[in-house]
Image: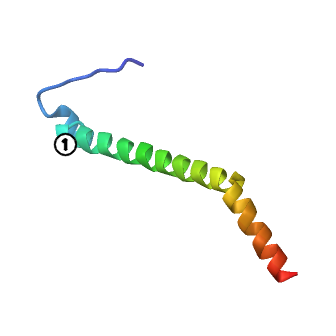
Amino acid sequence: MKNVLVIGNGFDIAHGLYTKYIDFYNFCNAIKRVIDDKREIAIREDIKEKLLKSEFMKSTANIILTKTH
């Protein structure tokens, strides 16, 4: 099976393909949002991990444990 690419005459749009410039722009924005969301999640996970390992958290946990016992 061979692929045929016809451009410039509306053939692609007439067949329901999303090949307008705005479609490409929207696709790029969607990809950017996914990347930004993943980056934000990774940063939050990194901060959470560092906080859990921090001396402040260990000290706070010790204070809470000694006050409850």
Q: Nearer the viewer, residue 1 or 49?
A: 49
Q: Residue at x 64, y 55 (%)?
A: 51
- Report x, y in % for residue 63: 77, 72
State the quadrant of the C terminus: bottom right
Colour mapping:
rainbow
Look at the picture and state if 32 lies above or below 52. Answer: above
Look at the picture and state if 32 lies above or below 49. Answer: above
Question: Which image quadrant is residue 18 in?
Answer: top left
Q: Residue at x 79, y 68 (%)?
A: 62
Q: Is residue 59 left or right of residue 6?
A: right
Q: Residues within 10 Å of mark 1 (few under 14, many from 20)?
A: few
Callout 1: SS: helix
Q: Which residue type carries mark 1?
A: Ile
Q: Nearer the viewer, residue 41 or 32?
A: 41
Look at the picture and state if 69 lies above or below 32. Answer: below
Q: Is residue 34 left or right of residue 61?
A: left
Question: Which image quadrant is residue 21 in?
Answer: top left
Q: Residue at x 68, y 53 (%)?
A: 54
Circle 1 sits on which residue?
A: 22
